[in-house]
Amino acid sequence: MSNILSELQNNILTLTINRPEKLNALNKETISELSAALNDVVNNPEVRVVILIGAGTKAFVAGADISEFASFSVQQGKDLSRNGHQALFDLIEHFTKPIIAAVNGFALGGGLELAMSCHIRIASENAKMGLPEVSLGVIPGYGGTQRLPKLIGRGKANEMIFTAGMMKADEALQYGLVNYVVPQEELLEKAKSIAQKILPNSPVAIEKAIKAVNAGFQDGVNGFEEEIKEFGNCFGTADFKEGTSAFLEKRKANFPGK
Ligand code: COA
């Protein structure tokens, strides 16, 4: 798995997209390796939080690999988009463990779409985000037209998409596209510190929270109903028994993750 570097430390899995000479552009191989790396750990209780970052100091991901699709037909274009959604972007959004994007430079096109499919985004001061696809005669195809308006509002998303412009980290923070902006050398540490705050909590409850939050953004799904269902389901879990017992016994919970 040369395009993805993987490191598991203290229940936090850091996956580094590793094509720095191409600014970590997402070619077919990288997408399938990233997808495989996530599928490999989905049932591994040792992995509790995932951090995604790009190799080097210049880019998170500078987009889908333009050289791969430049000569595609209409059908190949549709397949590229659909397969990408299924293999990676939807997988991340609905992943049962929190995924934090550490945006360490350019996050353009598929790179911003990758960050937007993650549950939490933080950025380094040099990060620049944008959806420049219309400058190439195409539109965002990995969820950009759907996730960006939901994150920053339709008007600003339209402006970003139509102008193909880049948003700097401080503006991204102002629009809520990222939660924090920190100096680049502190970025991974900041991502890990957020992960550390997640770790003591119930993995089962977090999984159900991801489901309920996502439900509110899905067409035809009633998010409140999903919340009611998952809230109720929590009462049947060992984590709930442990969490409530620990509180009443005035001790720290030690969640079994079941
Ligand atoms: N797909 C394929 N290759 C890419 C790429 C992409 N999305 N983004 C960067 N690269 C490659 C460049 O072709 C170059 O390769 P080379 O050295 O073999 O020529 C290498 O990465 C370095 O990029 P370069 O353009 O020389 O760096 P820069 O600092 O001058 O510019 C960017 C940085 C991000 C502004 C510029 O690379 C860029 O505009 N990339 C495309 C962004 C984009 O449109 N993404 C959406 C795709 S749908």
Image: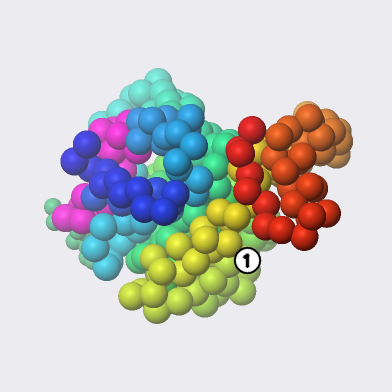
Q: Is residue 59 left or right of residue 207?
A: left
**76 relative position to 225: left or right:** left
Q: In x, y percent, where is residue 215?
A: 73, 37
Magenta region: 19-34
The residue lying toward the viewer, choosing from 235 and 164, is 235
Residue 161 image point, x, y percent: 52, 55
Camera-side residue of 189 and 147: 189
Q: Amino acid at mark 1?
A: Gly
Tell me what residue is drawn at x 27 percent, y 66 percent.
58
User: Is 29 one of the magenta-colored residues?
Assistant: yes
Picture residue at 40% right of the left edge, 79% below the top: 183
Q: Is residue 62 visible?
A: no
Judge whether 116 appears above or below 183 on screen: above
**Residue at the location (61% across, 74% down)?**
174
User: Residue 115 colored magenta?
Assistant: no
Q: Is residue 16 visible?
A: yes
Camera-side residue: 175 or 229? 229
Instruction: Check the picture and name the quadrant holding the C terminus.
Output: top right
Q: Residues within 10 Å of mark 1 (few under 14, many from 20)?
A: some
Report the side of 193 relative to 107 (left or right): right
Q: Residue at x 45, y 34 (%)?
A: 44
The residue that disc 1 covers is 176
- Please, what secondary structure does the residue beneath circle 1 have? loop
Residue 94 position in % (x across, y down): 58, 36
**Residue 221, image x, y percentages:** 78, 31
